[in-house]
Amino acid sequence: MAAAESPSAALRRRDLCSRGIRLAGKMRADVVDLLDAYVEQQGLDASASVAAMEGVPLAAVERWDEQTGTQRLLENLAAYRAFRALLAQMLEEQREQLGEADAGLGRALAAVLLQVSAFAYHLEELLRLESRGIPGEEEEDGPPPPPRLSLFEQKLRGLGVLRELAQWAVRSVRDLRQLAKPSPATGTAPGLAESP
Amino acid sequence: EMYMQYERVGADVTMKCGSMDWDAAVTWTANGTDINESHLNGSYLILKNVDLSQSGHYSCYEGSSWHLKYQTYLRVGTPPKEPVLMCRSNNYPKGFYCSWHLPTPTYIPNVFNISVIHGTKEMVCEKDAVPKNRCHIRYLQLFSTVKYKVTLTVTNALGKNFTTLTFDEFAIVKPDPPESVVAKPVPNNPRRLEVSWQNPSSWPDPESFPLKFFLRYRPLILDQWQHVELSDGTSHTITDAYAGKEYIIQVAAKDNDIGTWSDWSVAVHATPWTEEPKHLTTEAQITETTSASTSSFMAPPTTKICDKGAVVGSGAVAVCWTAGLVVAAYSVLFI
């Protein structure tokens, strides 16, 4: 069983969680605005259902309240790394489709991509604090890239990506609040006092 | 054997007297009272354009023997209109409830069936004992982008209707109003009121899912509300109240991140602290009032010639400057 967290580590964790909550809150607000602009610019129906697409991390989770702190951090990190790649791809597709025709949407996409990258880094900091190894990113071992999508499929995928990202931002706020809670008995964060 | 019969308002109803022939002599009663023969066509009872008041127990007796040949309970009503359905989560993230009602009564029994589908999964909506027109669902997943589809079907003997609601998890989150709202004056502060409240007891985990609050207040004599949004804490001090005026105060709650505002809490009333008026009964107060009201200076009888700071010397020979000048002046006069 791991030793109880030191007071300075607990303070650092709470500080990182608070800042992470603010980051995720701001990110969500920007993603929601981006989603509205994207739907309008791409001529999509805002209420259209989009089936789950390969490679887009789903925010939906069962038994969320039973997750450990480590699980929360690892799942969040995996998700935001995936979103980083997806948003970069969307940005590239956007530039190919429209060139400079809608620079505003491109800039908004780039701003959200920056926030996603910053948040992923923030999660890595939290994992380091936990003295957990940070999982490497899948680069060479991943599956081969899917066949190139049609323009319409790209648009739908973009819609799916932004919707899931908005959900993840809310989930991340909730996850970080759980992490920030001190455990009453040991003073450690719930679910973090585990054997490696 | 007692039959049950349902008919629409406005319908024409024909009742046969069991297996009796058309030309048999019969007597019909409604709730024990004989029905006029003008309503009969042979042994058939004809009720034209029925209304709600014609619901009741109808019996048919053979003419001579007065044997009961047939009886039925007639219930006049209407088929159901499209029901009104509402779903809400006031206990996020535990689950949500749906409640329903008919916009107009049918006057006959109705059966409600509800189905809840999330993606491809059918979920069970457990009916509440009280109230009867409500059921609740536990969330199996959180943070899903897949919408919930709730279909309510209502059926009665005269027809059927339904309605469907589609929503996502976040959209229906609406807490109950804050509880135990208390407003108190602040001693010695004529423009302040201290307001405090509690999270609604139905909100299961305010630590993990904190609420933010909206406070509104106004003096009773004005119509316009002042508003304050508060992102944390369950108390607030109003600092710009009009002195001496009675205020009405309410609070609403919302999840910090998702959903909509609750209804307003029960209103509380409070008046800021005011100073007690002074009663003019003591001599000192009268004197004070008098000296304060004179326009030119007039030394009151108790006023001393010497102020403390104007004394020169000490002990038995201590004199003040003023007295000294007066004495000096008289001295000069008499020299």
Image (cartoon, grey):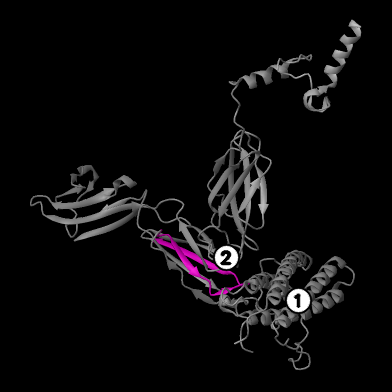
**Residue A6 picture location, percent across and down:** 67, 78
- Picture coordinates of residue A101 (x, y %)? 88, 68
Is residue B145 highlighted in magenta?
yes
Amino acid type of the residue tagged 2 in the rendering? Thr
Of residues A65 and A69, the one nearer the viewer is A69
| Residue shown at the point (85%, 65%) measured from the top left | A104
| Marking on residue A122 | 1
Say above or below: A96 vs A30: below
Q: Which residues are magenta?
A: B131-155
Q: Position of residue A168 (x, y in %)?
A: 68, 73
Q: Nearer the viewer, residue B177 or A90?
A: B177
Q: Which residue, given by chain and number where applicable, does mark 2 sit on?
A: B166
Label 1, secondary structure: give it.
helix
Dot 1, crowdedness within 10 Å: few (<14), some or many (≥20)?
A: some
The residue sitting at the front extreme is B316
Tell me where residue A18 sits by quadrant. Answer: bottom right
Task: Name the residue type under label 1.
Answer: His
